[in-house]
């Protein structure tokens, strides 16, 4: 009885320290059974599986579409601008055996994938100017990088589904230079707008002054015409009145002349037989 208890205890200890002959494969995983460093079996179907304790161990690889996200890295464009690039990719392990033979682990494979994608990005972005990368040619660039990275990664059993630029920034010192240039350009634009505005204002003032002078001239013309017509009408009335009673009209005009010229402050030196004094005799 004691022997059986000892045997059971040994088995339990072996199981505790990792000598279990069983392992579980999840539905999202592919397992490779390795014996003395060499792969002997690939397990695709999920469930409880068997391995030789201590002699064999299991390496797991994820069979789902995986995310790859890297830290920002510098890339130089065709027009010699430095970009701080942050990109991500979608990838999957197509051939777990190839991945194991090349890298042994999934994490090591991810490091190689990082090198491949960054290399292709650096090459392709170096063929385009900054403006193209930021706006017009980004989709084409990403398609090209994805295709080339997939070709290189396929040799290791990896499939690259998509590569995208998440963010592209200028380094801090470049940002300051760009902002300074943008401020100078905006200031130049503002001066041009102010100059054009002043020119337009001067044109408006000139046109207004011209119209003012034309209106005043027309008004003066109309007033002078009206005054002339009024004087002419007054002369006709005077003439008509004069013709009705010449002597009375002459008398009235002389009285008006006396009224305006004969006062205490006026001294007239006239001949006694002057025509002007005929009504005072």
Image: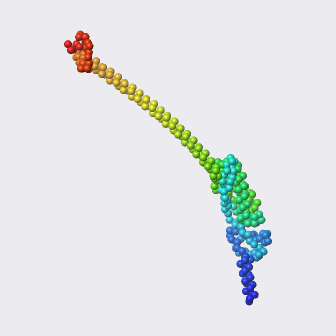
Q: Is residue 272 above or below residue 19?
A: above
Q: Is residue 248 above or below residue 12?
A: above
The way the protein has been coloured in the rendering is rainbow
Residue at left 63%, top 52%? 172
Q: Nearer the viewer, residue 178 or 21?
A: 178
Residue found farthest to the bottom: 1
Residue 228, image x and y in percent? Answer: 35, 22
Q: Nearer the viewer, residue 26 or 177?
A: 177
Q: Is residue 9 above or below residue 101?
A: below
Quarter that holds the N terminus? bottom right
Quarter that holds the C terminus? top left
Residue found farthest to the left: 281
Residue at left 71%, top 78%? 16
Residue at left 28%, top 19%? 238
Q: Quadrant of residue 93?
A: bottom right
Residue 30, image x and y in percent? Answer: 72, 68
Residue at left 30%, top 20%? 235
Q: Nearer the viewer, residue 130 or 260?
A: 260
Residue 103, image x and y in percent? Answer: 75, 64
């Amino acid at each position: 009885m004691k022997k059986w208890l000892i045997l059971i205890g040994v088995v339990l200890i072996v199981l505790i320290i990792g000598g279990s002959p069983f392992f579980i494969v999840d539905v999202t995983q592919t397992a490779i059974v390795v014996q003395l460093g060499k792969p002997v079996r690939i397990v695709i179907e999920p469930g409880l599986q068997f391995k030789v304790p201590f002699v064999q161990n299991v390496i797991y690889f994820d069979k789902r579409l995986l995310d790859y996200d890297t830290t920002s890295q510098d890339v130089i464009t065709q027009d010699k601008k430095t970009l701080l690039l942050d990109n991500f990719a979608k990838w999957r392990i197509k051939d777990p055996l190839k991945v194991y033979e090349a890298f042994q682990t999934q994490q090591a494979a991810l490091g190689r994938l990082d090198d491949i994608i960054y290399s292709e990005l650096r090459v392709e972005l170096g063929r385009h100017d900054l403006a193209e990368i930021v706006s017009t040619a980004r989709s084409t660039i990403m398609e090209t990088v994805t295709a080339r990275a997939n070709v290189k990664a396929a040799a290791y059993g990896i499939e690259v589904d998509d590569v995208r630029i998440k963010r592209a920034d200028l380094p801090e010192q470049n940002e300051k230079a760009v902002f300074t240039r943008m401020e100078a350009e905006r200031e130049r634009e503002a001066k041009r707008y102010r100059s054009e505005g002043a020119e337009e204002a001067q044109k408006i003032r000139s046109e207004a002054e011209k119209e003012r002078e034309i209106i005043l001239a027309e008004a003066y013309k109309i007033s002078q015409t009206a005054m002339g017509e009024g004087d002419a009408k007054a002369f006709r009335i005077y003439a008509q009145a004069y013709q009705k009673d010449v002597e009375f009209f002459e008398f009235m005009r002389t009285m008006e002349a006396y009224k305006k010229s004969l006062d205490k402050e006026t001294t007239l030196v006239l001949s006694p037989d002057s025509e002007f004094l005929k009504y005072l005799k």
